[in-house]
Amino acid sequence: MRVKINRDTCSAHLAFCERCLGKFLREPMGYERHCFEELVDDGREELTVEIISGEHRTVLVLNKEQRLLAAIEGWSYFVDFVPPMYRDQ
């Protein structure tokens, strides 16, 4: 499955954003949020997550174990930039 998430469309605090994506990572077939721009069943076992946050674009390819770890740790732990805590600053 491939999902494209645009954090710029949601003004939620980073902690809420991480909890929201964490819920999806645990239950990818039963959870969808308004920040999702694309959700495609590409036939792959891995989950590909493209995250857009400001000028940053990151792609994470996660197997089941990595998906659960990212759900617990939060997606910001796995990207190579520091996302802003608040979107409106």
Image: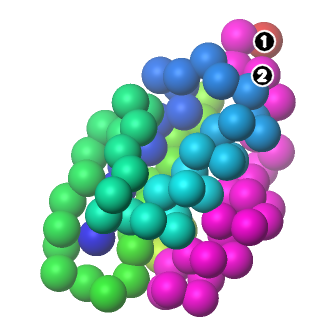
Q: Residues within 10 Å of mark 1 (few under 14, many from 20)?
A: few
Kind of element beneath mark 2: loop
Q: Secondary structure at mark 1?
A: loop
Residue 4 at least partly seen? yes
Q: What whole-number distance in Å separates the C-alpha atoms at marks 1 and 2?
A: 6 Å
The residue at 82%/30% (across/down) is 85
User: For residue 17, which quarter of the picture?
Assistant: top right
Q: Position of residue 47 (x, y in %)?
A: 40, 74
Of the pair 8 and 54, the residue shown nearer to us: 8
Q: Residue at coordinates 49% horizontally, 86% vertically from top-left?
A: 63
Residue 38, numbered label: none
For the residue pair 19 and 37, the one nearer the viewer reads as: 19
Residue hosting label 2: 86
Q: Nearer the viewer, mark 1 or mark 2?
A: 2
Residue at the disc numbered 1: 89
Rendered-image quadrant of the C terminus: top right
Q: Are marks 1 and 2 in contact (CB under 8 Å)?
A: yes
Pick the front one: 57 or 1: 1
Point out the stretch of residues depicted in magenta: 62-88
Q: Which x, y percent locates residue 7?
A: 54, 33
Name which residue type carries label 2.
Tyr
Q: How is the image coloured?
A: rainbow
Q: Residue at x 50, y 86 (%)?
A: 64
Q: Is residue 79 magenta?
A: yes
Question: Above or below — where is 15 with respect to 58?
Answer: above
